[in-house]
Amino acid sequence: MRDLLPPAAYRHAELGRRLVRTFELSGYELVTVPLFEFAEVVERGLGGLEASEVLRFVEPESGAVVSLRPDMTPQVARLVATRLSQAPSPARLCYQGSVLRRRHERARRHRQIPQAGIELVGCEGPDGDLEVLSTAVQALRVAGLTEFVIDIGHAKIASALVESLSAAHTRDVLDALEIKDETEVVRRAERHGLKGRDLAALSELPWLHGGEELWPRAERVLTGTLAAPYLAELKRLWQGASELGLSRQVLADLGETRDFAYYTGALFQIHAEGPGRPLGAGGRYDNLLERFGAPRHAVGFAFGLDDVAWALEAAGRLPSLPRRVLLGAGANSLAGVLRDAGIAAASAPESDLLAYARAWRYSHVLQATPTGFELLDAESAQRSSVPAEPAALITEILARLGVGSGVIGKDGPCRQ
């Protein structure tokens, strides 16, 4: 858990606004789900999440076990299966909020993870996958990031090769595959009785990653195995994403595994310089709604706001802080018109105006002079005079602030 201080809090909020607004413009309606969820809902939705990763509590009045949500997708699934069960498909929903997980990584990371994401429920096949991936990419571009890599996979490729093993043995083998340890993958698979073409193909998965050059080799390795149909699905998705120009690099990883057990098809990740982990991830989960009694195809994607912000900072593309004006002597009468024009304005204390403005991130100081007003750039300390004529005053101030022009009419100033 942590606090966010200015200006980080503003940048996180602005980043969330940009992502959610892009989701909404693509037809995804905003929903909110509770921070606490019945543990039964969480466990039903996250079959592959270890119990130690979920924070549980006993609700004092009823004695029910509840969890701080570790993921919002099962909550959206519950919502669609119950309160929206009569709505026609597809359902397009988006959300923003924090999830809470215990993290078991070398680098110390926060348990509270702010996210923004989308869920497309009731849409089958590659068209739905491409819609979600395209919407995520568009949102990331609107947020300010232009250079990133899309990495796709398929949940069934690896699992099809170990289908003959028990659930426990499957998990044991896939744990080794997750860290791309070919020797350990083969050792565990042989110990659990896997052999033949499936074993040979499984041993190749850690190395089957790339772009266009990947497919001939992947087809040779997986032809004749249960994974072959899923390879064909993944190739169609890769071709669709490449043809749409979603990124300069669209890569496929045939050895991809994922923490959550509800994924059944395509998997997506987006990477960029900075955080050393995906900025966002998602995929197809066609069986999840069935666990809530309302079978529907579904696919979703979620961004981690911390990681997106990190990537934006590395690229020098963090959201700019808004113009804020500190009003000195004789300028307080302009507070209302500045605020109406969308500019934050507040009265200055009786102290060093410039020091105060810099400490609290005001971009400018405005104060009266004998001949009009003076606008002081807080960062550079550059001063400029503003004439006092009422008809031109706000227009001139807005122009000097670099936020557009203004017009004064009977209803006060407005942005053009």
Image (tube, rainbow, N blue to C red):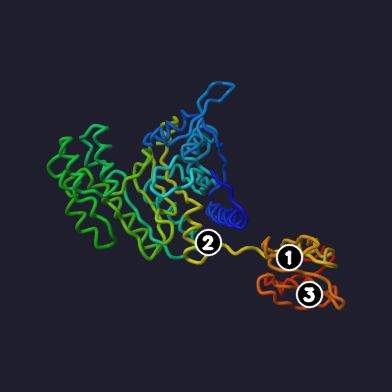
Horizontal and vertical percent position of residue 357: 71, 64
The amino acid marked with disc number 1 is Val
- Residue placed furthest toward the top: 62
- Residue placed furthest toward the left: 196
Q: Tell me where residue 273 sits by quadrant.
A: bottom left
Residue at figure coordinates x 56%, y 36% from the top left:
34
Label 3: element kind: strand
Q: Which circle's residue, 1 or 2, is located before the other in the chain?
A: 2
Left/right of residue 335 with respect to residue 188 in the rendered view: right
Q: Which circle's residue, 2 or 3, is located before the other in the chain?
A: 2
Q: Which mark is residue 259?
A: none
Q: Residues within 10 Å of mark 3 (few under 14, many from 20)?
A: many
Horizontal and vertical percent position of residue 281: 42, 50
Label 1: element kind: strand
Q: Is residue 99 above or below residue 356?
A: above
Left/right of residue 288 with respect to residue 23 in the rendered view: left
Give the CA separation, mark 1 to mark 2. 27 Å
The amino acid marked with disc number 3 is Glu
The amino acid marked with disc number 2 is Val
Give the CA separation, mark 3 to mark 1. 12 Å
Q: Which mark is residue 325?
A: 1
Give the CA separation, mark 2 to mark 3. 36 Å
Q: Which residue is mark 2?
A: 142
Viewer-proximal residue among 336 and 22? 336
Viewer-proximal residue among 186 and 365? 365
Q: Which residue is mark 3?
A: 374
Left/right of residue 297 with respect to residue 317 in the rendered view: left
Question: What is the quadrant of the C terminus in the image?
Answer: bottom right
Task: Find out whether the residues at labels 3 and 1 contact each other: C-beta distance under 8 Å.
Answer: no
Horizontal and vertical percent position of residue 389: 85, 76
